[in-house]
Image: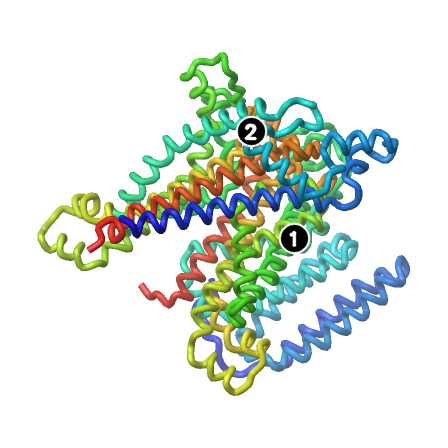
Amino acid sequence: MPLATSTFGGKASPWVSRIAMAAVHFFILVLFLQNVAADTWSAIIGLLFAHLYSVVALTYWNRIDRSAAGDTVIVTVTLEFVLIAIIFWDRASAWPWSTLFGLGVVQVCAFFAVRYWKDLRQAPKSAWFGLIVVLIYIMIAAMAPVIAPFSETEIVGSEYDAWTNEHLLGTDNLGRDMFTRLIYGGRNTVGVAFITTVLAFLIGGLGGLLAAAMRGWVDQVLSRFMEILMAIPSFIFALLILTIVGTSVPSLIMVIAVLDATRVFRLARAVAMNVVVLEFVEAASLRGEGLWWIIRAEILPNVLPPLVAEFGLRFCFVFLFLSGLSFLGLGIQPPTADWGSMVRDNATLITYGDITPLLPAAAIAILTIGVNFVVDWFLHKASGLKE
Amino acid sequence: MSQIAKLVAQRLALGLLTLFVISLIIFLCVEMLPGNFSEAILGQAATPETVAAFNRELGLDLPPHERYFTWLFNMVQGDFGRSLASKRELSELLGYRLENTLFLASVAAVIAIPLAVTLGVLAALYRESFYDRAINVVTLSSISFPEFFVAYILILVLAQNLGWFPAISNINDELSFWQKIYRTALPAFTLTLVCVAHMMRMTRAAIINLLASPYIEMARLKGLRPTRIILKHALPNALAPIINVVVLNMAYLVVGVVLVEVVFVYPGLGQLFVDSVRSRDIPVVQACSLIFAMTYVLLNLLADVLSIMSNPRLLHPR
């Protein structure tokens, strides 16, 4: 780690950043001009996107509290990404959206790494492991089509081929490339789990804060309702509801989000209850602040750390839940690749001593372990323990 | 003692209410089916006569409240209706399946509970040592594994490579007790691995929580050995949270068997449940979810009651 010894301080270097931003804009522009002949609409949307991106980037680039070393890191990472994209131009330009998304992920990660470098340096090895794992998964999910050698549902060989150079991990029960499916499966499973968790937090978190802030009958009604939902084991309840509404991705997301929102609600309400009784909240309500202000500006900042940690844990839970459902054939439906169903479809191979079907399951396990490690570190930091 | 009796009675009443509400929810879920249920099941080609016959068979022609109470009343009496797919009486089938599931869960519990408590006490005894940290990482990881991953690894190692246990645990009534245990071993190990981590961590945390209290300090100053301090002084007071988490994990076991049963093709309730969800066999799904939910609620209730009963402050009122 060469950066470990450098201290972030000193003046910003505007010319580096300007050149870098210019390079990025150029890159985006080229990416979309490539598609002009093929598809006018995507070119127009792309150009609009490029403009939006420049406006946002230029506005925030100068506002962020930054330093020369920090700038250099972000710029280097960006340029490296662009360079790699140029080397693999065929693939990068064939899926411009994925490439751009990947670029965004890289920039955001670099930004956060620079911003919180001081904390990161003190992070234990397990947290580093977790962060790197999560980062790799996000990148793979963001750029699945660019990385994967074949298309998601294409049949490229005979059934259950062995591992070869062409098919790195062999083929699956229908002759589709296992490595490709693994990458796409990551995108689908992680994506659906992430959306579900966000939705669960919007419902449960907002409900919990509302219940704590308003108290009275709102609290009573919401709490009793959530308690009843929680009394039913969620796996059983999810299966029951999925029998009725059928298994499609939107209904899957809604069902799991609502069931998980109950747990988020309980935590958010419990933590917020401790904050609501403090003097500054009373002061805010006495000076006539509205409900929304009290929730957003008084309560939310004080309950954020446990909620963020809970987000990580909930994500793991949803992720395992979802792959469990898919494993039972009741989650994300084929031919969409999904880690849970990939294990199930290729399970016969295990009886021949082949470990290929275990790879998706291992992928699930590694991600959840990684997230757990990060959450552990975060909780430790948030609790203010110094050992 | 009256205080305990009052608290327990309160919990029991609450539990009964919960059960009632759950049965209502399970009933209403089916009620809220979009469109016409019978047409969705029978398909577009169904004639009005077949739809009417189907409705009558399921009692769908009656008003909802009447249907609910009939259904609930039959359930309580052990009459679960008929399966849509096989037209068989459910009571017999469900009873046999439930028995198998409970057998699996209890085998797992018999292995898991002593193991978890022992490991937890050891971790508390040798805290901050290599053993403690190693077990911390292992348990944190094993919580993160999906059940089917653990199951397949066990199959790969214990059944495929070493050949000690059968990979598929199809048990039936003709097998002797020990044969049944032998065939149930792998699913039971899987469940054990999945739930030991949680119990062990809670045991450790419950004991360590107490170690800062003055009476433990006193015991230490008297020069007692650490083993004695933990077993004789800390453990009895940590019993309430430990019992609580053990029973909660039992609840998890009964519900968590679904995935494991599917992996090992074990003829339990979970397998039946998943099959009927796939074929949208509503009466079976309703009956299974009611049984699962009931077991879950009852075990949760038991955890509540036990943790009240094992609370030293309530047991020995001044």
Q: Are marks 2 and 1 on the same chain?
A: no
Question: Residue shown at 66%/36% (left/top)?
Answer: A329
Residue on which disc 2 sits: B78
Residue in front for this viewpoint, B72 or A20: B72
Picture quarter containing residue B283? top right
The image shows residue A210 at horizontal and vertical percentages of 56, 69
The image shows residue B286 at horizontal and vertical percentages of 62, 36
Q: Secondary structure at mark 2?
A: loop
Res A247 visible = no
Label 2 crowd bin: few (<14), some (14–19), many (20+), radius 10 Å: some
Question: Residue shown at 68%/46% (left/top)?
Answer: A184
Q: Secondary structure at mark 1?
A: helix
Label 1 crowd bin: few (<14), some (14–19), many (20+), radius 10 Å: some
Determine whether A82 is above or below A90 in the image: below
Q: Is residue B142 left or right of residue A171?
A: left
Res A326 visible = yes
Determine whether A49 is above or below B246 in the image: below
> Which dot, 2 or 1, sits closer to the camera?
2
Q: Quadrant of the C terminus of chain A?
A: bottom left
Determine whether B318 is above or below B70 in the image: below
Residue in front for this viewpoint, A123 or B121: B121
Mark number, residue A134: none
Residue in front for this viewpoint, A237 or B230: A237
Residue in front for this viewpoint, A245 or A86: A245
- Chain under disc 1: A
Q: Which residue extends farthest left?
A: B222
- Disc 2/disc 1 C-alpha distance (Å): 44 Å
Residue on which disc 1 sits: A191
As shown in the figure, which amino acid type bears the numbered disc 1?
Gly
Question: Residue shown at 74%/56% (left/top)?
Answer: A92
The image shows residue A383 at horizontal and vertical percentages of 39, 65
